[in-house]
Image: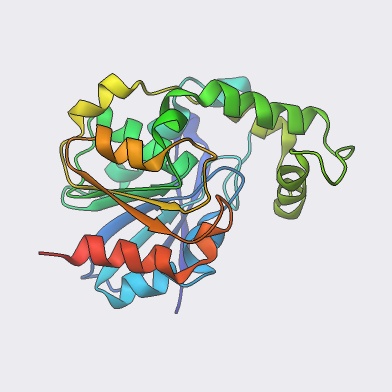
Amino acid sequence: MDVKTDYFAGYHGDRLALHTMGPDHGRPLVLVHGLFSTAHINWVKYGHAARLVDAGFRLFMPDLRAHGQSSAPHDPASYPEDVLVKDLLLLIEHLGLTDYDLGGFSLGSRTATRGVLQGLSPRRLILGGMGLEGLAGWLGRSRFFIDVIDRFGTIKHGDPAYIAQQFMKAQKVDQVAARLLLGSVDDTPASALAAITQPVLVVCGDVDQDNGSAPKLAETLPNARYVEIPGTHMGSVTHREMGEAMVAFLTEE
């Protein structure tokens, strides 16, 4: 299935990649990938995008700044508070979308959540790989990844940071840009979630606790359901159940 890649101007005019799949007349669905991943890895590689296209959707899948084919500037001015949300708002404006669905995985879920709280109004929202504590406890996660960057290349097998180091190596992560980006992400307190009233799918691996409790997140949101799929945090995106859960949620009456 063909993927078309274009570019759009994000915050500060930075050049960001946008990957599109599906028919022109398909229902718009914007999907935001996770930290140190790409649109291809989270959505295309394991068949989720193809399942969604087969279900009638047209997918818009950006590579976040400092990820994939998007620019990775080293200028701190390119990383203000909530810059990923600013980029998402600009993408929705660039596409001219008014009736659409929105989904994310991990950092993409944080970004989508904060985008809705800042005025986006998708029909339905998908939060993958995210728990309640993950939205409000970013500082701890950020410190973990900054430590990986500081010790990059020296972390040995058996260290809790080893898998993250190896994944960053495989993705050729720009460490300067990544460190700047990590400092731009904001917390979202549980009390703010009452404002998210559209239907929400919280989908998470059965052994994924990286971002806290997904069931608690679903319980806290006003109109959400929790669907458990197999896998760890990084492994859950490799299972077909991820895409199947997304299709089922987005196509129900």
Colour convention = rainbow
- Residue 135 is situated, as x and y percent measured from the top left of the image, at 42, 29
Q: How many marks?
A: 0
In the rendered image, which quarter contains the N terminus?
bottom left
Whether residue 250 is situated above or below residue 150 in the rendered picture = below
Report the residue at 51% width, 50% height from top.
63
- Residue 197 is situated, as x and y percent measured from the top left of the image, at 15, 36
Q: Nearer the viewer, residue 87 or 29?
A: 29
Hey, which quadrant is residue 52 in on the image? bottom left
Residue 74 in sight here: no
Residue 127 in sight here: yes
What is the residue that sits farthest to the left in this orientation?
253
- Residue 57 is situated, as x and y percent measured from the top left of the image, at 27, 68
Report the residue at 23% width, 69% height from top.
26
- Residue 45 is situated, as x and y percent measured from the top left of the image, at 54, 69
In the rendered image, which quarter contains the C terminus?
bottom left
Hey, which quadrant is residue 122 in on the image? top left
Q: Nearer the viewer, residue 23 or 250?
A: 250
Hey, which quadrant is residue 114 in on the image? top left
Whether residue 89 is situated above or below residue 57 in the rendered picture = above
Q: Nearer the viewer, residue 248 or 40?
A: 248
Whether residue 55 is situated above or below residue 217 in the rendered picture = below
Report the residue at 70% width, 52% height from top.
171
Report the residue at 57% width, 42% height from top.
35
Query: Left or right of 233: which side holds 153?
Result: right
Query: Left or right of 101: which side holds 108?
Result: right
